Image (cartoon, rainbow, N blue to C red):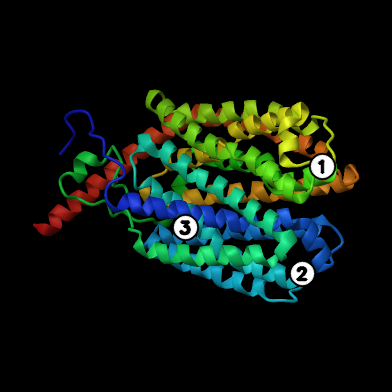
Amino acid sequence: MEPTGKTPLARPWVGRDRLTYGILFILGIIVAAASALLPPMTGVLVATLGVPSDDWIALVVTIFLLISGFAAIPWAYMADRSTRRNLLIISTFFWIFWFIPILFPFLTYWQLLLFYSLAAIGVGAAGPLSLSMTIDCVPAHYRSTTIGILGTAAGAGYGLGFIIAGLLVETFGWQTPSLVITIFGFATGLLLFFTKEPPRGQHEECLIDLQEMGVVYSYTLNRKDLQHMWRKGSNLWLIVVGIIAIIPTAAFGAWAVRWLNVDHSLSIFVATLFMTLALASQIIGTAVFGRLGDRFFKKDRRGRAYLILLCCLVAGPILIFASLYPFTVAPTATIWDLFLNPATFTFFLLLFIGTLFDAGITPLIYVCAGDVNPPEIRSTALSLNMLAHVIGVALGTQLVPSIAVTFFGGFYSMAFAIICLFFFVGAAITIPIIRSIRQDIDTTEKETRERFQNQSRKESSMEL
């Protein structure tokens, strides 16, 4: 049966799909919070563990991120050949298990590094598997919105990690925030048992008329599909821009509290509150640009790539200016003093607007990767984009303190300004994506439909 008219649109948020998406949202918050715990506690960790400088704590964070990124690939490959839900449950309890030894007293630096590295193996599954399941919950023209909302979970999680670590560390010690996240993680792992594995391709608009005949898309990943993935130019460029454009984002997320503490003499408590409010713009940005991405996509299949370009070109100059913006406050200044001071309030607005645009980049990259790859390979493709993201985060996390210590006497302002130049590199890399993505999406839809038709013929012949 060939379609005779306009392809009908599947309705998102049906039944258990909505519940599954909600639980994946909660998981995103907890995983992001677990990843954000250490940087706000850097000063306390350096003193408690007896390490020479901030670089040693940055190394733990960097190794954690890199291991989680590389671990995402085998998790995703297994997910494309089996049930994503079951793997997500296993991986969640795996990282929780290795968070428990971190709570032991008299922990050494090397033990912290070991347990965080092992936990990172489980953390690596959360991103690609959650994104892949989300994409199968909704049709293509809603993907930017749903991935954008899921992206707010990461922003909320980083904020939660900042708050838990920044507010509890000075009073209760650095292991208390880890205990809180371990409890939340265990509860979320239990919630995953109530999720549902969404059928692959159930909302692909190019397949809906065939699915209405009662055929379920069951094509699974094989090695030839991996080779074919690299023939689409968009895949490679999306990975590259995913590394470059995320470097400044990671730098601000990891070291902004330390920056305000060292360069501007704010207490860790006040700096944490200030940056949590400023970086709250990322929650707004992911949702706003997700919605805009869907609207642009309906008009032009290159629309989401155009938005990535826009976000890079706007975020870069604003955040460079914010990094170099001069202001002085008393070390005893409260959060209210900062907002009543015109200079620090202007600084807040610059950070808020810059990170608002910055927040749109990563979710739009993930949605573009989902658009140019068929259902059976999306987990693997997204895991490569997650790895690119993690490499960018690791670079941003490691580069800022290294630049600050090596070239600027431990002060961070100029290091942040230099890091923000990567936004312009990311903008340049987005141009070849704009040129190729429309054709790549058309090719993917054609291939997916042909595979579904072949599968339907085989099933019909077997019944006969």
Give me the disc on residue 88. none
Question: In this view of the protein, can residue 326 be seen by the observer?
Answer: yes
Pointer 3 residue:
76
Quarter of image, res 403: top right
Residue placed at 74% from the left, 35% from the top? Answer: 338
Q: Which residue is mark 1?
A: 412
Marked residue nearer the N-terminal end (1 or 3): 3
Q: Residue at x 68, y 55 (%)?
A: 167
Whether tag 2 and tag 3 are in contact, CB under 8 A, the answer is no
Q: Name above or below for residue 334 compared with residue 126.
A: above
In whole angstroms, how far apart are the C-alphas of marks 2 and 1?
A: 24 Å
Which of the pair 166/418 is nearer the observer? Answer: 166
Of the 4 image quadrants, the one containing the C terminus is bottom left
- Gap in angstroms between the C-alphas marked 1 and 3: 37 Å
**Residue 225 percent location from the top left of the image:** 41, 50
Q: Quadrant of residue 113?
A: bottom right
Crowdedness near tag 2: few (<14), some (14–19) or many (≥20) residues, C-alpha within 10 Å: some
Residue 124, position as x, y percentages in the image: 55, 59
Residue position marked by numbered label 2 in the rendering: 109
Q: Is residue 464 left or right of residue 8?
A: left
User: Mark 1: few, some, or many residues within 10 Å (few <14, many ≥20)?
Assistant: many
> Could you tell whether 138 is left or right of 387 in the image?
left
Q: Residue 92 appears at what percent x and percent y? A: 49, 65
